[in-house]
Image (cartoon, rainbow, N blue to C red):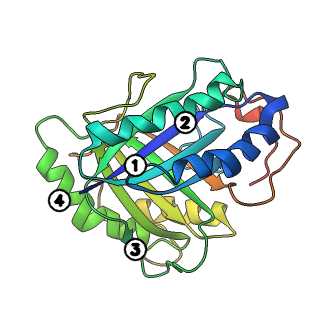
């Protein structure tokens, strides 16, 4: 058995926001429960707080699916037709931004000391990452033994799961800019502070006095970082506007 994480990055037409939410937490969840190896799924919305504020945020929404599968080639593609239901119903914006990326996890979730596992997450962040060619082993050792520990000890960051781009991908396939996935869980009501202290620790100027070790050059700078807040299974904000890859269109509810 192996753990797999599928990211569905997409936008929703402004007039379909509530319809998509009702579909996801209704019939879609019922269909997911019948998939072999399915563990859980949640839905997220991009936040105005971002650690790399200069990079584009082309997706307002992200759904995360987790599976435990003996053979991904057999079972993982079954997710495709379920997502296609939303696409066929016009619930996914036809703006060429939709992406489906599946990763094979390198291991289970690594919990930090502050993770209250009986309480929901407030959000997650994802890095579509890469390693420097020829230095994969060094990259893995640095992330597993050094950087992951540093990250999940930042206040508000509570856990991490990582993975590599899976051999099997769900249609429609698109180019993926990150061969490696780094997904960090949050439990915080002050994401701005969490992101600020994360950056301060990385630069060695955190008021906590904690400084991260220098970033390993085995980790490529070709990466993008995206923070999202959890919205599934809760009261959904109904006053959205169409998102076009520009955070000026985002109303700032975080």
Which callout, 1 or 4, points at the residue further toward the start of the chain? Answer: 1
Query: Which residue, given by chain and number where applicable, does mark 4 sit on?
Result: 141
Seen in the image, is 195 located left or right of residue 220?
A: right
* Marks 2 and 3, how far apart at CA: 31 Å
The label on residue 111 is: 3
Rendered location of residue 84, percent (x, y): 57, 28
Callout 1 secondary element? strand
- The local crowd at label 3, few if under 14, some if 14 to 19, many if 20 or more residues have their Cα within 10 Å, is many
Q: Are marks 1 and 2 in contact (CB under 8 Å)?
A: no
Query: Which residue, given by chain and number where applicable, does mark 1 sit on?
Result: 5
Rendered location of residue 99, percent (x, y): 50, 29
Which callout, 4 or 3, points at the residue further toward the start of the chain? Answer: 3
Q: Is residue 196 above or below residue 98?
A: below
Query: Which residue, given by chain and number where applicable, does mark 2 sit on?
Result: 82
Q: Residue at x 58, y 65 (%)?
A: 194
- The local crowd at label 2, few if under 14, some if 14 to 19, many if 20 or more residues have their Cα within 10 Å, is some
Rendered location of residue 33, percent (x, y): 52, 54
């Amino acid at each position: 058995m192996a753990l797999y994480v599928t990211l569905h990055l997409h936008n929703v037409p402004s007039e379909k926001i509530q319809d998509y939410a009702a579909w996801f937490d209704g019939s879609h969840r019922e269909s997911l429960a019948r998939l072999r190896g399915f563990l859980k799924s949640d839905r997220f919305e991009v936040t105005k707080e971002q650690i790399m504020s200069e990079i584009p945020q082309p997706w307002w929404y992200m759904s995360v699916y987790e599976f435990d599968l003996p053979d991904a080639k057999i079972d993982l593609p079954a997710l495709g037709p379920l997502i296609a239901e939303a696409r066929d119903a016009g619930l996914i914006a036809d703006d060429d931004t939709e992406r489906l990326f599946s990763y094979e996890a390198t291991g289970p979730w690594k919990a930090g000391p502050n993770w209250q596992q009986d309480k929901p997450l407030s959000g997650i962040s994802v890095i579509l990452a890469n390693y420097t060619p020829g230095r994969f082993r060094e990259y893995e050792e640095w992330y597993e033994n050094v950087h992951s520990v540093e990250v999940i000890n930042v206040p508000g960051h509570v856990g991490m799961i990582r993975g590599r781009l899976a051999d099997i991908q769900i249609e429609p396939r698109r180019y993926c800019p990150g061969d490696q996935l780094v997904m960090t869980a949050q439990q915080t009501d002050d994401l701005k502070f969490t992101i600020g202290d994360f950056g301060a620790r990385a630069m060695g100027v955190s008021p906590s006095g904690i400084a991260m070790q220098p970033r390993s050059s085995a980790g490529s700078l070709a990466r993008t970082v995206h923070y999202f807040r959890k919205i599934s299974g809760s009261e959904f904000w109904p006053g959205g506007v169409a998102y076009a890859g520009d955070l000026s269109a985002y109303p700032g509810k975080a």
